[in-house]
Amino acid sequence: MSSIPWPFPEARGYLSGLSRRGRDRVRRWARRRQGADPSTATLTPGRVYILPTGVGLVFGLMTFAMLLGAMNYNNNLSFVLTFILIGVGFVAMHQCQRNLVGLDVTFAGAEPVFAGQAIRYRVAVTNNSKHMRYGLRLYTDTAGSDVQDLAPGESKIFVLAARTSERGWQSLERFGICTLFPFELFRAWAWLHMDARGLAYPALADDAPPPPPTMTAHGHRQHDARGEEDFAGLRKYHEGDSPRHVAWKAFARSGQMLSKQFAGADTSSQWFDYEQLQGLHPEQRLSVLTRWIVDADRTLEDYGLRIPGAEFPPAHGDTHRRRCLEALALFDPGSA
Amino acid sequence: MARPRGTDGSLLASLPWTLAALLVSIAPHIPFLPPWITAAFLACAGWRYHVERKRLALPSAWLRAALALGCFLGVLATYSSISGVGPGSALLTIMAALKLLETRRRRDQFVLLFLSIFLVMSSLLREQYLWSLPYMLVSILVIMTAWLRMPAGERQSPRQSFATGARLLAYAAPLAIVMWLFFPRISTPFWAVPIDTSRAASGLSDTMSPGDISSLSLSDAVAFRVSFAGPVPEPRDRYWRGLVLTRFNGRTWTGGRQPGRDPGARDQIEARGDPIEYQVTMEPTQQQWIFALDMPTEWSLPRTYFMAPHQQLASSVPIDQRIAYEMTSHTDYVVGRELRDLYRDWYSSLPPDSNPRTANLARVMRRAAGSDTAFVEAVLTKLHEEEYFYTLEPPPLGSNPVDRFLFDTRRGLCEHYASAFAVLMRSVGIPTRIVLGYQGGEVNPLGGHLIVRQSDAHAWTEVWLGDAGWVRVDPTAAVAPERVEIGASDAAFERVREGWGFSASSRLVQQFTMAWDAINARWNDWVLGYGPDTQNALMKWFGMHEPTWRKMLLTLVILVIGLIGAISLILMFRYQPPEKDEAAQLYARFVARTGLEPHTGETARLFSRRVRRTGAIPADTIDTITDAYMDARYGGNDDARVRLRQAVRTMT
């Protein structure tokens, strides 16, 4: 912002409001005529928009001035120069639009993050044609990706980062793909409205109370034997099974990963219970639970999660962690 | 408000190309720019590149402001004006140099490239040679490459950028040609074109001082070209009349103004014999004189041209562009039979007490001759028979130059002879005037036109002999008849050939010279001379009735839209995804037949199971098609493609 005060602050507010409203109206119009996009959208000519840039307007003025000069001096080579530049301008316009048309845009997911962190939406853009696509960039109102070129047949990931403030589904309601190629005289762009979602887990609590002590399923303190006294058999290893329960001897013999199964009520575990966190705001509770899960996961402990309406028995591993965190992310306190 | 002055090397990929674009566009100006400006530009360019490479700081705002002021004052001091092509291009060069010193972002580079485009245009305003067009195309290509380099950075090779630029230029070329042909040309400028004072006038000067070395005699530059409707006149008739000098101050001949301005002052012309029709394409001279075969009787000239007294054709403004005009002349004529006494004295006046020996000689010879005509003959005989030489390097003459020339040095150019002859005539009261123009010219066997060069510049006299009117007398012809018979340029050509010692290949050289001239003549006529008249003719040739600017603009718009549509189509096809191969197409027919839709990620094998469950197509057909498709698609197997084709055909 410049330090010189604008003499009519109301006028500025009014103008910027006007331009914003106009922009929103155009966007709504585009959304209506395009409809929602499937997970892979091909940019058809009808949805690639193009307008001259500032440089393009200056270029237009310059060629007009040159035309007047050439007419005045009746200088035929100046005419040639001027008309070549005008021709290049026309060609650049079409080239700019064609640089986008036919690209396939696919939403390629977003890694979950903790609320407050930046979520990184990944969008794959594929060039199925036989020619290079230059200077492509994805953008939202608040962020933009790197500028990349696409060779024929090539597909690249463009990352759009967005701040998250709340847990739950974060969606990229609209994003654009644009290009200034070849001369930045024109800017061609297309809007995409995909079901592009990423999950934000609850924010990680910074000052969480210590996790509850390890308990048996009946609420007793955990014995040192850790509930492994009643060996019940072997079953196929599943992702998330504790490495301590893998039958390593059997693995050495057969090469097959098997997990030991234990019977009996005394299966030990640590339960993280929403209800037990009294005196905290629901969101704070979720944050604390999140912190506990992340810490427990790091120390390879088994843990279970109990929230109103859902219960995840103690287990371990990435899948378990993800399921627990997803449940926390999507938990609706009103339902409790 | 202090901005960071350091550079980060981010322009390293594009800066060399921006510098190249500037260099290419400044190069044609360098011969015309004062050396300090070229030096300043090169220094700034080198400095800027060094700064970027070593990531140094840019010069401070104060230093830049001081440099800008200094350079501006320098331009003002050099040119004493800032309008016109000369000072304009100097200023553009300086602006580019100084802009370089504050270039840190892409926007600054845009400014530099816009400047280089203006520099290209101003070089075209200065001169439009045959090579100017290819050079301009190369300049545009370099500028476009530099333009593409700016955003491309390290991602694309310079070669890629260059290829892209060339491709876009190729697409733009037909558009440019159509616009160039159909854009309506106007004949009157919108605003007064500033006269470029930095450009020296070429061709004849409008005074004549025998004894000053004439630089023209060595210049091979073309003065004008002439296309005759009929046969080309004989060499001895090729006198191209320019301006007429009537006043002599003892040393210098000047135009002078005839006393009185009544219309009767214009000489009456009685033309005899057949008219000679021709068209002249004259190079710009920055002067007013227009040349025509002696004696012009009819002419078609724009309004700004007129017939001055003494049958001089002139323009009211300096001729700063190539012009073409049609003329009719008669080589057999009588002009100015009536000459009033007032003028008789005026045409025979000489400064008192100048060149006394010449005056004496004239009186003696006139008395011996008995008549004016005989006196003219006697003088020509004297020049022919005595030791007078025609030379391109005459010795200098002191005061009383005519005396010194006639009696001492005895060597000179046409202007010495014309001047001496005129003084001899005037000394005995015979009205005499000097005509400056060109004599001769060379027929180009390829173009069929006549080329008149600056080296054909000539001076001769006209003597008023009563009933015969003004009679052309060329004293140089008496001294060096070959000057008039074969022409000065051929004589010059002989000299060059002897000097270089390649008589064997001289025919080849001459042919080459002629071919080059023929191409240049076409270039002048069809490209540079393309104006309202030529355009009208071309439009009629295209079948347009009564071409108006409206019709032309309409045609232009229609053609441009058509061409852009074509370009758009070409681009569409170029960017289309490649056709699916035959196997995929055949498989698509199979899929369509099943009535099912493959899911994303579903393999052909899984899909076949689903199809089998519907029972619509026999199971073995499904298997054959699926197997053949997999082999053809992923195995690249021709045999499998044949099987697939058969299986799909039998299926339907």
Image (cartoon, coloured by chain):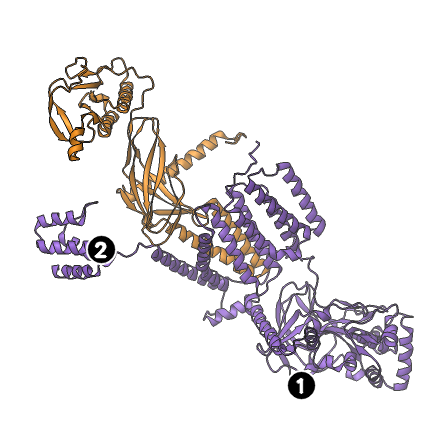
Chain colours: A orange, B purple
In the image, residue B458 sits, relative to residue A322, either above or below, namely below
Q: Find disc 1 in the rendering and name its residue.
A: B273
Q: Residue at x 67, y 76 (%)?
A: B441
Q: Secondary structure at mark 1?
A: loop
Write the residue at 36% across / 34% down: A161
Q: Nearer the viewer, residue B438 or B3?
A: B3
- Mark seen at residue B635: 2
Q: Position of residue B458 (x, y in %)?
A: 74, 74
Quarter of the view holding residue B345:
bottom right
Badge 2: chain ID: B
Q: Chain of mark 1?
A: B
Both labels 2 and 1 in a single chain: yes
Q: Is residue B587 visible?
A: no
A16 over B278 or under it: above or below: above
Residue B427 vs residue A336: left or right? Answer: right
* Residue B560 appears in the picture as rendered: yes
Give how far apart the Cα atoms at labels 2 and 1 are. Answer: 92 Å
